[in-house]
Amino acid sequence: MDYQVKTLIAEDNFMVGEMIQGAAEDAGCIVVGRAFDGRQAVEMTTELRPDVILMDIKMPNLDGIEAAKIIQDRCPTPVVILTAYDTPEMLEGANAAGVGAFLAKPPNVLELRKAIVLARGRFGDLLSLHRANDLLRKRTRELEEALASIKTLRGLIPICAYCKKIRSDKGYWQRLEEYITEHSEADFTHGICSECLKKVETEMEMKANVDGTEPGVLPAEGKASHPPENPNPVDCAGDRAEGIKKKRG
């Protein structure tokens, strides 16, 4: 390793810890601290901020897997588990705790160097995944907040079967578009569909035909432009009778 990795060793056995420290220094690491139980490992990680932790599993107060879980929550750091034995349950728990590599005790220099590189590489992948998850959660939260701010019409809406007005909560009858605009983020732009356009044209044609053919009835313009030919029929009859008398006389 070109870079001297700052290393924290968590091992409750002093002599085993000495062997681990010697292997770590031969692998090019700088040992910044030694912890002798899980709780101390958590505290020293938060204080010293090492690049990697070489963690024993069986330790007093707090075992290595539980300590690794707390460390990943408080101060995420690559962890290499050192153990004299392993079981499927232990491996599963260590993976869930974010452990990056496993190594048998006592480690040799070459294996230790590989385990550290592996743990740090996996840790980088986990950080990228966590950042992606955090971004996804943030966007999901923003979307939920945006959806919560949108007004949505739900439930039964009292509407008139004839004029299609809607009765508001206060008992007033409102036009459909007014009600929807008031209770949602929607707005209206009016137009006319092809079916309604045909109905309107048909009604206009029928009305024009009726106005033009009904006997004794003329449109307003027609009445104005065609004054009555015989405005006073009684007087005209009297004039004709008077004319006849004059001729006889």
Image: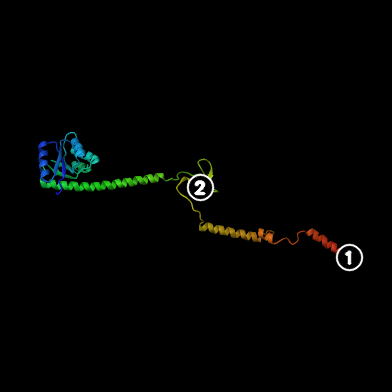
**Judging from the image, what secondary structure is the residue with disc 1 in?**
helix
Quarter of the image with the C terminus in it:
bottom right
Q: Where is mark 2, residue-wise?
A: 178
Identify residue type, mark 2.
Glu
Q: Nearer the viewer, residue 206 or 170?
A: 170
Q: Is residue 18 left or right of residue 78?
A: left
Q: Can residue 127 be seen in the rendering of this structure? A: yes
Disc nearest the viewer among 2 and 1: 2
Give how far across and how far down residue 242 sits, in percent: 85, 62
| 237 vs 77: above or below | below
Q: Nearer the viewer, residue 123 or 105?
A: 123
Q: Mark 1 sits on what residue?
A: 248
Viewed as shown, does residue 152 lie left or right of 137? right
Residue sticking out furthest to the bottom: 247
**Is residue 247 shown left or right of residue 131?**
right
Left or right position of 100 against 233:
left
Element type at mark 2: helix
- For label 1, the crowd category at 10 Å Cα-Cα, with few meaning under 14, some 14 to 19 and many 20 or more, is few
Where does the image place residue 25, in percent across and percent down from the top left? 11, 44
Measuring from the top left, give residue 243's x and y in whole percent: 85, 64
Residue type (three-letter) at the residue carrying disc 1: Arg
| Residue occupying the far top of the picture | 61
- Residue under the point 20% across and 47% down: 122
Instruction: Determine the CA span between mark 2 and mark 1.
Output: 82 Å
Comparing 87 with 26, the one in front is: 26
